Image (cartoon, rainbow, N blue to C red):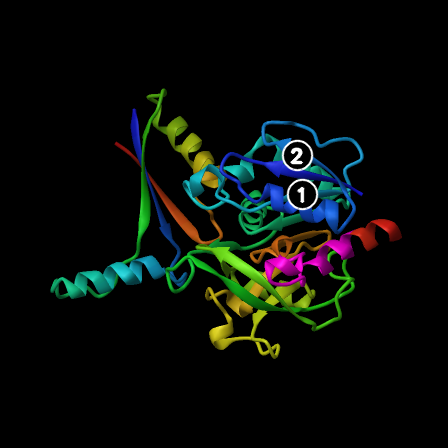
């Protein structure tokens, strides 16, 4: 699998994303600067990593979402190519129009950095086939603007089409209440595009791939991507 | 020509920052504030002096970048 990892000024998780892609997915990774017009030939997967692109100026992900390279990413997604946005990457995908909705300031106004349980809503996608459906995983979150917000019509479409990828939950898999760390509507931690080939999520699976880091529940996502490539 | 673009949250969209500011005003003893909504103001210098052209390019700027119309409204004033 060939993965293109996008780089915008102010991102800081690109190394973590590349490490997970190389070590767990067995991917060949290339770092792609935002001013480029094209993705490397043969790109299977585009990853938009986390950080603080353009210092979160204007709105999180707003300026990066309109960069040159995003035209190529939209074309890649339109061809059915895989796109994964993590944290700031999720915000960038929403601002670029690749995913619906917007990530607002956390409801408690605090930057949240902690371990967090998620429920995997379905396991028949390129991103989650290595998990069991409804499996509860523990990864970390680190964001100030992760409060997923969309209009009622969009939310109905996401729910109706099974496009919620992950929900915030407690260790027993119960969603809602205190388990929802940032006030996201419907406890949404990640969503798919209509074609299920674009995933955006606030939590960081790429940081939970080695036991020494406190867990390995993030490996499933990167194993899934490798499985999806083999099946293709 | 100069313009001022004001971007505000749509009615019904939760604004935790506005709520926090409202609470801070109350704690300062400033009474009579029923609600606060936070927004953004852009002061823009334009090359054109044609009002219709200015309106049209600013609307384009708002739709493409200055506002996220999922949750925000914008207002354009030529000054």
The residue under the point 43% across, 32% down is: B56
Q: Is residue B54 above or below residue A19?
A: above
Q: What's drawn in magenta, residue-wise?
A: A208-225
Which chain does tag 1 point to?
A
| Front one among B6 and A80 | A80
Under circle 1, the secondary element is helix
Q: Position of residue A190 (x, y in %)?
A: 61, 60
- Quadrant location of the C terminus of chain B? top left
Q: Position of residue B12 (x, y in %)?
A: 40, 63
Which chain does tag 2 point to?
A
Residue to which mark 2 is pinned: A31
Q: Is residue B31 left or right of residue B51?
A: left
The residue under the point 41% across, 41% down is: A58
Residue to which mark 1 is pinned: A18
Tell how many labels.
Answer: 2
- Is residue A231 on the magenta stretch? no
Q: Earlier in the sequence, mark 2 or mark 1?
A: 1
The residue under the point 63% across, 63% down is: A215
Q: CA distance from mark 2 to mark 1?
A: 8 Å
């Amino acid at each position: 699998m060939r993965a293109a990892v996008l780089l915008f000024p102010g991102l800081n998780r690109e190394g973590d994303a590349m490490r997970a892609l190389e070590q767990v997915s067995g991917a060949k990774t290339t770092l792609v600067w935002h001013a480029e017009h094209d993705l490397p030939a043969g790109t299977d997967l585009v990853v938009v990593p986390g950080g603080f692109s353009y210092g979160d100026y204007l709105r999180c992900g707003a300026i990066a979402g309109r960069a040159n390279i995003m035209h190529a990413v939209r074309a890649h997604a339109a061809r059915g190519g895989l796109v994964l946005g993590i944290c700031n990457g999720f915000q960038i995908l929403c601002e670029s129009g690749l995913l619906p909705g917007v990530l607002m300031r956390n409801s408690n106004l605090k930057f949240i950095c902690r371990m967090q349980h998620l429920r995997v809503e379905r396991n028949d996608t390129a991103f989650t086939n290595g998990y069991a459906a409804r499996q509860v995983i523990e990864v970390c979150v680190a964001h100030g603007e992760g409060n997923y917000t969309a209009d009622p019509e969009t939310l109905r479409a996401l729910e109706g089409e099974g496009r919620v990828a992950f929900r915030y939950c407690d260790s027993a898999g119960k969603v809602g209440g205190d388990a929802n760390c940032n006030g996201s509507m419907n406890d949404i931690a990640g969503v798919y595009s209509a074609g299920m080939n674009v995933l955006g999520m606030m939590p960081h699976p790429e940081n939970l791939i080695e036991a020494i880091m406190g867990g390995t529940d993030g490996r499933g996502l990167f194993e899934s991507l490798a499985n999806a490539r083999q099946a293709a | 020509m100069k313009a001022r673009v004001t971007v505000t949250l749509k009615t019904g969209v939760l604004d935790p920052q506005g709520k926090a500011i409202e609470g801070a005003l109350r704690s300062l003893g400033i009474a009579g504030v029923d609600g606060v909504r936070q927004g953004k103001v852009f002061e823009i210098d334009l090359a054109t002096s044609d009002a219709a052209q200015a309106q049209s390019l600013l609307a384009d700027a708002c739709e493409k970048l200055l506002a996220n119309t999922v949750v925000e409204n914008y207002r354009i004033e030529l000054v």
